[in-house]
Image (cartoon, rainbow, N blue to C red):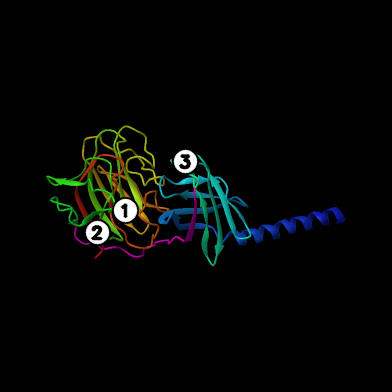
Amino acid sequence: MYSKKNKWNSVKILLVLIAFSSYAQEAESILGKWDLEVNRNGVMVPSWLEIKQSGNKALVGYFVAHNGSARPISEVFYHNGTIDFSIPPQWDGLNDLHFQALVEHGKLKGTLLSSEGGAHSFTGVPAPKLIRKGTINWGKSRSIFNGKNLEGWMPQSKDRKNQWTVSEGVLKNPSSGVNLLTEAKYDDFKLHIEARYPKGSNSGIYLRGRYEVQVEDSYGRDPDSVLFGGIYGFLTPNEMAALPAGEWQVFDITLVGRRVTIVANGKTIISDQIIPGITGGAIDSKEGEPGPLLLQGDHGKVEYRNIQIQLPK
């Protein structure tokens, strides 16, 4: 006989299922990757957010600020169109970073309380998938550094003195200062570039100005996404291919949409992997647009040479 107790239990289960279905439909609108623009005291800086579902109801994710690496979010709270989460400080400040946003017409709008204590407004749009179809026919390789001067290159900041010099076919960053970027912007490409740094130094090659390939003295260490050859904070090389400091490190990098392959010193260390989003220090969060090649010069001494690029025909 079907008891009242069994009937009540069935009703409760049905209510839970209805509630979960409603929550799942509501949360669906915020799942995925978001390109953010943050107003830091009148200066627009890029940021990035990913929200995904863990299990039946929990929401988790990753966040990239204007600097640093991707940070995990242990729990994202979402109710009545409002996203809310906090994460510990990384490199700057002492306070937790607090994020709150409303979803309006498929876009995000909110306020970021930074680890340094400031309140900054931001907006966000869904990140493009950057899916490419068909086979690419590559053109001939051509040099984008003439080995004589900085023609075709410019400092990222016009407010700071440019410390980059050229000597005997080598592009040199003798001390920490401004980053250097190409005047030209690129979409998909194959890049050949060689780098040399002293012991303990650090630089980076930003693809489209948004995705950093880490250039760092990592010889003898285990591979990591924040060490030599990694896509900073996102993709870890399958082995440590770095030569000792003071030797020329040779990179061959292919970027097609979000898919990247990195060959370092003759070894394929990242093979056709998807870059989730921008890395800290990106020039902007406009992932759907072409961007420059950027060489990081604000971390330490480094030299580059033999910079060549291939573009689709």
Q: Please tell me whether residue 92 is drawn above or below residue 134 in the rendered image.
A: above
Q: Nearer the viewer, mark 1 or mark 3?
A: 3
Query: Mark 2 or mark 1, which is nearer the start of the sequence?
Result: 2
At label 1, which amino acid type do we have? Leu
Label 1 environment density (alpha carbons within 10 Å; few <14, some 14–19, many ≥20): many
Quarter of the image with the N terminus in it: bottom right
Q: Position of residue 103 (x, y in %)?
A: 56, 62
Q: Which mark is residue 169?
A: none
Q: On the image, which quarter does residue 129 sit in? A: bottom left
Residue at the spot x=52%, y=60% of the render? 109
Label 3 environment density (alpha carbons within 10 Å; few <14, some 14–19, many ≥20): few
Q: For mark 2, what is the residue?
A: 183
Q: Report if residue 301 is visible in the image.
A: yes
Residue at the spot x=36%, y=55% of the render? 259
Closer-to-camera residue (85/278) = 85
Q: For mark 1, what is the residue?
A: 207
Secondary-structure class at tag 3 = loop
Closer-to-camera residue (93/70) = 93
At label 2, which amino acid type do we have? Glu
Q: Position of residue 98 (x, y in %)?
A: 54, 48
Query: Mark 3 or mark 2, which is nearer the start of the sequence?
Result: 3
**Do the numbered discs 1 and 2 sit on residues whose CB atoms are within 8 Å?**
no
The stretch of residues the image draws in magenta is 118-141
